[in-house]
Amino acid sequence: MSVIHMSDLDLSGKRVLIRQDLNVPLDENGEITSDIRIKASLPTIKLALEKGATVMIMSHLGRPTEGEFDDAFSLKPVAANLADALDRPVPLISDWVDGIELNPGEIVLLENVRFNEGESENDLKLAKRMAKLCDVFVMDAFGTAHRAHASTEGVARFAPVACSGPLLTAELDALGKALDKPERPFVALVGGAKVSTKLNVLEALSKKVDILIVGGGISNTFVAANGNEVGNSLYEKDLIPTAQKLMKETEIIFAQDVRITKEGFGDWNHNSVTAVRATNEIAADEEIIDYGPKTVEQVSQIIKNAKTMIWNGPCGVFEFDAFANGTRDVAKAIAASDAFSVAGGGDTLAAIDKFGLSKDVSYISTGGGAFLELVEGKELPAVAILKQRAKNA
């Protein structure tokens, strides 16, 4: 990747502004429920401090009304988590856009970038104000690299030096290894609710992989496209022709047997009553909520033989234990495989977390939309500007 790398720079005595993706999930009490993204950011932050930099970290959190402070979207819990992880104070700075006083070697967290009007519109006046804060801007937030925002793309235009952080570099290297020159068989698993939200990904992967596996509601659309009743299951009737077209163009594996329930959505719980059905036996009052055991066995065998594996999205409603078998067992197959495996997307990370498999997947991407856009073959705006800056350096 033709960009400047933070690891190659002398940062001693420099003011370094790092854009991280610290958009962590919070419960109703404002407690962090998964700190995977914070942990992923730590090596970059520690390296900058070790190099003698004064460090300013910025991130977004949630979707507040832009330009307005909202305590529900404050980075306060993130600052506390970072302080514990780094074993040093990490003050949260609220008013920072017009400059802040820092002592050499200090580290601070800047309050939610989305509290600044013009952030999402990539307002260049705002971007210039951000750039004036630093000697070096480090783009390390892969999860936001597909967005041309002031804190991701705009600031990189105007900072004295703009470079890629270690996490962003690792993300691009891992996905490049999987997508550009994969060892074969190359297998992809794409799960989730709707074909429509991942149609571009499915079409792009169908041209690259040897076998494409689909799970969740996406699988249901293929089950229906194969001429089966899907009852009350989530599926997209209007995309049945698209599913049928894809099945003619590449080998697509979808559920051959399924786990169903007759309970409605509001009644789902960890002890829900379920049953297994072949896909040609589903009744009109039943709802598919997971892979069946034969499908799990088939998919697991395919994964076992793979040399390269991309995973995005669950195989069922894994959040409920009664519906989690498919996602759990397929995730374990990916973890046990000798394949170079890359997993990405919020639900995918949550599943990996739930089943304790984070150490067994070759690379876990912190990106959702950025992950999918790279898989589609798109260039990410925040990466494109880093390449341009390096070219002009």
Image: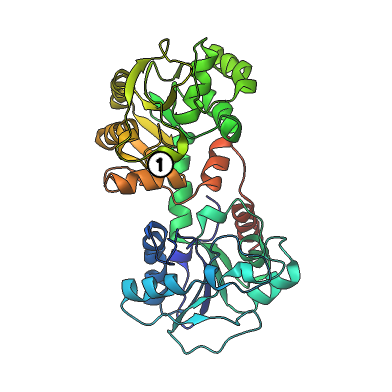
Instruction: Using the rendered image of the protein, determine whether residue 249 is visible from the camera's viewpoint.
Output: yes
**Is residue 289 toward the left or the right of residue 151 in the image?**
left
Q: Residue at x 43, y 44 (%)?
A: 347
Which quadrant of the structure image shows residue 289?
top left
Q: Where does residue 211 sit, x and y in percent of width and height? A: 43, 21
**Residue at screen point 38% across, 60% down:** 35
Residue on which the image places disc 1 = 343
Is residue 295 in view from this perspective? no
Seen in the picture, residue 260 relative to 106 is either above or below; the reply is above
Could you say whether the residue bearing mark 1 is in a helix, strand or loop? strand
Identity, as a three-letter code, of the amino acid under mark 1: Ala
Residue 386 place in picture, x, y as percent: 60, 58
Between 150 and 60, the one nearer to me in the picture: 60
Q: Residue at x 39, y 47 (%)?
A: 349
User: Could you say which quadrant of the image residue 313 lies in?
Assistant: top left
The residue nearer to you, when weighing 275 against 23, is 275
In which quadrant of the rendered image does the C terminus lie?
Answer: bottom right
Comparing 322 with 266, the one in front is 266
Total label count? 1
